[in-house]
Image: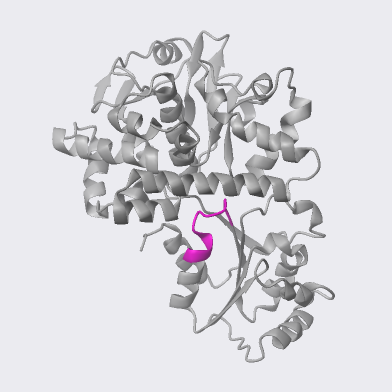
Amino acid sequence: MLKRKIDDLLLEWKNNLDKNALIIKGARQVGKTYSINKFCKENYKYYYYIDFNESPNYKAVFAENLDATSIVKNLTLEIPDLQLIPNETVIFLDEIQNCPNARTALKFLTKDNRFDIIASGSLLGINYKEVVSFPVGYTDHLEMHSLDFEEFCWANGLNRDALDIVRSHFDDKITMSESGHNRMFSLFREFIVVGGMPRVVQDFVDNHNFGNTLKIQRGIIEDYKDDIAKYATGNDKAKARSCFLSITRQLSKDHKKFQYSTVEPGGTSRKFDGALMWLYDASIINFCYNLYVPELPLEGHSKDNDFKVYMRDTGLLVAMLEDGSQANIIKGNLGIYKGAIYENIIADIFTKSGKKLYYFEKSNRLEIDFIIRQDDEPVGIEVKSRDNTKAKSLTSLVNFWGLNKGIKLTKGNISISDKIETLPLYMAMFL
């Protein structure tokens, strides 16, 4: 059984006496249904599960009047022994994107306050046009991702106490022992290859068979393609598929800015912007925006039309490459793709910690992989995949753009030099 951080967040939500209905968003197969089911069974006396995919007849409950009294009356037709007791009853509406009226009804069910309600779906950003009225002010929101690196470590037998020791080295900037560093970096490489999709991680923990994990990952990728074919509308079907399949080529370039001509010769933003946004709304990709200047607020200085695209789960990105790529990563040899994959895993880690992604590139001569806010200052991050860890761009950023600090993430151990901190790649989870 995989320990997930969302377990604590769900309990925190339940214990809030002034809570709203809870909406949990996330890509398919990141473990939403499993985690919510487990939580509801363990924390409520009465639990009712409604899946709008498996039981479309429940859509009739929300087909007419959306006031709480009408909905409860209709629910009793489907669930004759329905028990509604505040804080002891919960109803879980799964795949709610397939019933837009249920999304609207969350407002009235929250105001009614006869039971707790959780809603979830893999494609909540896709069918937004079909929702007549959003329950603004009456819903709480969580976004669930595939496992982050810390959760992956837990799954592989590294407990919280052990990770607290690693964190103490990060906090105090004390070099890790060689054995501790090698153990963490070995887990980090495995995380790159396995990724965080729960089914994939569980299989890896049980069997330690990279061949099995690759088969499962490629099955998930095919499911994503099927989702594009099923849910994307009109011309977006072909365009979203083309954008999705171009991601590995986009990241193989020296300069990884997303280029529409890589999707299709002569491709333009006008043609493909909608398809890219579809992939983002489906929680498949992340955007990383270039900055005009590396200053706070980062969002205020970002360029909407100048960005990189990363896969949300790095294990799936690796699975999109040819056979043998897993072995190359574990052995530390993947040529030009290694830099792209290390960038993707750091983007993965930052996104799962709640950061929006930014980078800084100036005239193709200066490129900083990521800019983050840390201690109310902009901090440049360079991701180094090679043993040569010189960071000329980062030094230029600190010397000529007024930043007080830069961080190199490398395969090496902790070291401090002037305004540049060198940290092991796996310590990105603490930034």
Image quadrant containing the C terminus: top left
Judge whether 94 appears above or below 151 on screen.
below
The image quarter in which residue 92 lies: bottom right
Q: Is residue 266 left or right of residue 318?
A: right
Residue at 47 percent of width and 77 percent of height: 41
Q: Is residue 223 magenta?
A: no
- Viewer-proximal residue among 191 and 40: 191
Which portion, as a residue range, is magenta?
25-35
x, y percentage for residue 2? 37, 60
Residue drawn at x 21%, y 45% is 165
User: Is residue 165 visible in the rendered structure shown here?
Assistant: yes
Q: Is residue 374 visible?
A: no
Query: Foreground: 89 or 218?
Result: 218
**Residue 346 percent coordinates (x, y):** 43, 34
Q: In the rendering, at what x and y percent does residue 243 appear?
A: 65, 32
How far across and down, in percent of the image, does residue 254 sit?
A: 50, 15
